[in-house]
Image (cartoon, rainbow, N blue to C red):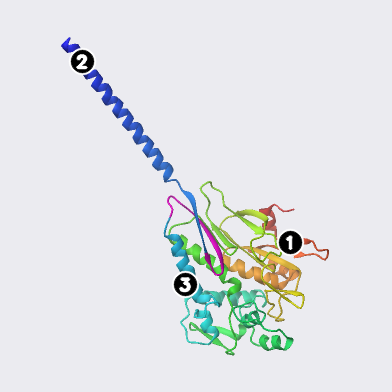
Amino acid sequence: MKCKSMISAIITSNCRKHLFDFRLKIHLVVLLFTSILWAQPQVFSFEGFAQGTSYHISYVAENKQARLPQQVDSLLACFDRSVSTYQTQSIISKVNRNEPVILDEWFIHCFLEGKMMWKATDGAFDPTVYSLVNAWGFGPGRKEHIEQKRIDSLLVFVGMDKIKLQKDKIVKKDPRVSLDFNAFAQGYSVDVVADFLKSKGFNNILVEIGGEVIGFGQKPNGQCWSVGIEKPTDNPEGRNENQFEFKLCNKAMATSGNNRKFRIIDGVKYAHHIDPKTGYPAANPLLSASVLASNTLTADATATGLLVMGLEKAKTYLDKHPEIEALMVYGLPNGQTGVFATNGLKKLLQLP
C-alpha cells in the first residue's frame, strides 16, 4: 500500500512536471511568435509644418523612430537659412543685398542647377526674376502698382548671364541682379530630406512637402507608394481633389499650377509664374504641369518652366527630354479642360 502511494505520488509529480514544461514551451512559443510579429516592418508616418506649408513623411521600419520628426524639422530650418528669401538673414537674402556671406552646399547646388535649367529651357526658367516677383506681389516684398515702365526697368536685371559663381563667390554684372530659388527650392528640400532619411538606413520612404513628393523602395506589401495629381481648380485655401492617382516607384513628382497663387488687378487674374522675357505673369492656357523625374528639384523646376513656355513649346521641350514625363492640364475656349500626357505617364495613368 505504501509502495502504491509512493508510485502514485511519483506519477502525479511527473505529470505535473511534464504539464509545467509543456505550458512553459507553449508560453515561450507564443512570446517568440509575438516578438516576430512585433518586429515585422511596417509603415510609420509623421507630419509637420515648414516653408509656409505642411509636410508628410512615411517610412518603413520595425520600430517607430521617435526622434525623426525633430531631426527633420531642424534640417528644414537649416535649409531655409540657406535658400529662403523669406528669411532676412538667409544666405540668398544676403547675396541679394550684396553682403559678404559664405555660400553653403545647398545654395551652390541651387545656383548651378538653376543656371543649367535656365539654359535648357531657353530662359523660360530663370532664378533672377526676384525683383519682378516682388513687384507683382508674389514675394516677401511689398506689392507695387505695376506699370510697363517699371517692368522694363526691372527686366534689365533679369537673366542668369548677368550673374555667376566664381571661386565659391557670387559675382554680378550689376548689384541689382537678385536671385529667387522659390520655384524649385521646395522640390530640392524634398530631395534633401530623402537623402537624410536614406543616410539613416531608411530606404523605403515617401517624402512630401507642399505637394512635391519623392518615393523610394516599397511598402511592406511589396507595393510602391500611392500618390495623386490634383485637379487644377480655383481653390487657394486648401488641397483639391485628385484628378489622377498612380504608384510612385523610385521617382519624384512636382506640380506647378496657376490656381492657388494669383492677384486680381483691375478685374484681371494674374498668376504667380513670371515670364522672364516679358516681365509679366505667363499668359497661356496651361493651368497646371505635373512632372515625373529622377529627383524633385528637377521635377519642380521643369514644371515651372513648362507653365511659362505654354503648351506647344512645352511639348517640344518634352520631345527633346525623354527622361522627363509630364502631364499638363490646359483650358479650352469652351471653358472645359484638356489633358496632354507623355507616353510614359499615359501608361502609368492608364490613359487612352
Neighbourhood count class around disc 2 (C-alpha, 10 Å): few under 14, some 14–19, many 20 upward:
few
The residue that disc 1 covers is 340
Image check: 163 left or right of 67? right
Q: Which residues are magenta?
A: 49-64
User: Relative to residue 352, is residue 172 drawn left or right?
Assistant: left
Q: In the displayed structure, would residue 349 be above or below residue 157?
A: above
Q: Quadrant of the N terminus?
A: top left
Q: Is residue 33 visible?
A: yes
- What amino acid is found at the position of numbered circle 2 in the picture? Ile
x, y (%) of residue 108? 51, 77
Q: Which residue is mark 3?
A: 78
Viewer-nearest of discs 1 and 3: 3
Distance from Cα at disc 3 to Cα at disc 2: 79 Å
Identify the residue at horizontal 42%, vertical 60% (top origin): 67
Q: Position of residue 308 (x, y in %)?
A: 70, 73
Name the amino acid, label 1. Answer: Phe
